[in-house]
Image (cartoon, helix red, strand yellow):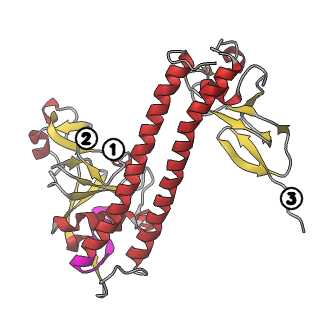
Amino acid sequence: MPTRNLYPAYSASGQDVWHTDYSHEGEAIIVSAVGARCGKTFIASGKWSAIANTHVIFPDRDKVDVYYLNLILDNEHFWIRGGSAQPFVLVKRTLKKKIPLPPLDVQRKVAKILRTWDEAIETAEAELKAKQERKRWLMQSVLSGSLRLKGCNKPWDKKRLDQVGMIVPGGTPSTSIPEYWNGDVPWATPTEITKLKSPYIYNTEALITSEGVRNSSAALLPADSLIVCTRATVGVCAINKVPMTTNQGFKSVVPASTDDTLFLYYVLNSMQSTFNRLAQGSTFLEISKTQFEKITIIWPSADERRLIASLMRTCDEQIESIGEAIEVLRTQKRGLMQKLLTGEVRVAA
C-alpha cells in the first residue's frame, strides 16, 4: 500500500506537525501571532500549511529576498505587541513600518554571507546533539553496570547517601535584619543551579554575612560539596567550588572524600525518576532530609568511581566546548548582521 505524502504545518511554535494535505506552495514567512514567542518567524518552502495562531507573509520575489526579509522580521523588537498575560502581534500596525531595502542582488549577497554562519551553527548544533545523545547512552550504560570500564570487574556495593557523606539542609537568614545580608558568603538558590551549564558553581547572586550564617540554618558548606535541589525542581545538583551556603530548597552532601563528589554528581543526575517518586507536597514538591539520606546509590570501588566520573566529565567538557563555540558563532552572526542590515558594512552590487 503506497505511503501518502506528508507536508509540514506551521503553528506559533514553528514546524511541529505534519498534514496529509497542504494549503500553500512556495516560499513565505510564517509569523508566530500569539503567546510568549509571538513575533518569532520561520521560513516555509515547498508545499506546506499554516495553522492556528500564525500570520503568513508572501514577499514579492521581484523586490525582496525571502531570507533577507526574514533577517529583519525575526526580531522581537521589530514587532509591535498587544496584550499582557497573553501577548499577541499587532500585524497591521507593524507592517506599516518601513524597512531598509537595498537592491535585490545586494540582498541576495547579504543573505549568502549570513547563511554561511547559519550553516556553521547548524553543523555545530548537530554535533552537540550527537554528543548529548552519546553522553546519555554512556551514562545509562555505565551507571547501570551493563557496560563496565576496562580493567573494572569488582562487584559493586550499594550505600545510602548518609553513609557516603554528611547530609546538610539549607536555610535563609531573616530578611528583616539587614546585618545578615550583603556580606561575602555565597548563598545559592535553586534558580541558579538550574541555569548552570557545567557541574560547577563558583558564585551566587545573593551574599549573606557570617552573622547571617550563625543565626540561621544556612550552614556553610566546604568547597567540593554536592548541593542538591530537593524542593520544587527536585534532583538538580551542582558542585560548589568555593565555601557556600544554600537556602532551604536544598539538601547537600558533604562527602567523606572530595574525590567522590564528581561521581556523586553523575549518579544523582541519573536518578531523576527516584527523586520524582520521593517528592511530596501540595504547595510544592519536596523531599525531606529523612527521605534524602536514605536514598540508595551504587558504590563501585574507589578506582572505578574515579574512572566513571572522569569519563562523564570528559563528555561534559566536549558538550560545553561545542556549546561555547555555538555562542561565539551566534554572537559573530548578530554583529555582522547588524552591520550588513544597517549599511554600516556594504557589499558590492
Q: CA distance from mark 2 to mark 1?
A: 7 Å
Q: Is residue 290 visible?
A: no
Q: CA distance from mark 1 to mark 3?
A: 48 Å
In-front residue for pair 39/204: 39
- State the image coordinates of residue 345 (x, y, percent, origin top left): 51, 18
- In this rendering, would 267 be left or right of 119? left
Span shown in magenta = 288-304
In-front residue for pair 258/342: 342
Point 37% across, 81% down: residue: 148
Does the segment drawn in magenta span residue 231?
A: no
Q: How many marks?
A: 3
Assign a secondary structure to mark 1. helix
Question: If you read the primary sequence from the N terminus, does the residue marked by circle 2 or circle 3 appear first?
Answer: 3
Point 70% across, 29% down: residue: 66
Mark 1, residue position: 192
Crowding at mark 3 (Cα within 10 Å: few <14, some 14-19, many 20+):
few
Inspect the image, locate mark 1, and give the three-letter code of the amino acid beneath it. Answer: Glu
Mark 2, residue position: 204
Tell me whether the residue at label 2 lies in contact with that at label 1, contact meaning CB atoms closer than 8 angstroms. yes
| 82 w.r.t. 251: above or below | above
Point 19% across, 42% down: residue: 186
- State the image coordinates of residue 309 (x, y, percent, origin top left): 29, 67
In-front residue for pair 153/178: 153
In front: label 2 or label 3: 3
- State the image coordinates of residue 178 (x, y, percent, origin top left): 16, 30
Assign a secondary structure to mark 2. loop
Q: Quadrant of residue 77?
A: top right
- Disc ID at residue 4: 3
Quarter of the picture containing the N terminus is: bottom right
Crowding at mark 2 (Cα within 10 Å: few <14, some 14-19, many 20+):
some
Does the segment drawn in magenta span residue 295?
A: yes
